[in-house]
Amino acid sequence: MTTPTQQPTTGLTLERLPAVKARTGMSRSEIYRRIALGDFPRPIKLGTRASAWNSAEIDAWIANRIAARDQGASR
């Protein structure tokens, strides 16, 4: 049972920067540059000096890159 202040768990996975860098092949500066441009998911602030990314958002970003590549190949 959940109380009004609790959210049910949905299997959400958070990834820290080293994992995001490994999955995307991008450097820290490139990740943050793309965030500033609105072309990459924004991190979730965990604390004063800690952030993480929703892995489902990273999955979707990767899938979009693949789809964009495939659309370009079919033209």
Image (cartoon, rainbow, N blue to C red):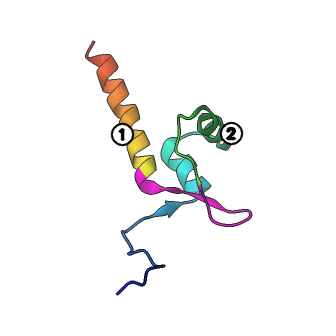
Looking at the rendering, in which quadrant would you find the C terminus?
top left
Marking on residue 41: none
Residue hosting label 1: 63
Q: Which residue is drawn at 46% across and 79% down?
A: 6
Check disc 2 and give the amino acid type. Ser
Is residue 18 left or right of 65 when viewed as pictured? right
Residue sitting nearer the eye, 25 or 2: 2
Marking on residue 29: 2
Region in magenta: 44-56
Please, which residue is most extreme toward the top here? 75
* 47 within the magenta span: yes
Q: Residue at x 40, y 48 (%)?
A: 59
Residue sitting nearer the eye, 10 or 60: 10
Total residue callouts? 2
Q: Residue at x 36, y 39 (%)?
A: 63
Please, which residue is most extreme toward the left here? 74
Residue sitting nearer the eye, 4 or 32: 4
Is residue 35 left or right of 69 when viewed as pictured? right
Q: Position of residue 61 (x, y in %)?
A: 43, 41
* 45 within the magenta span: yes
Q: Where is residue 66 in the image (x, y as percent from the top left)?
A: 36, 33
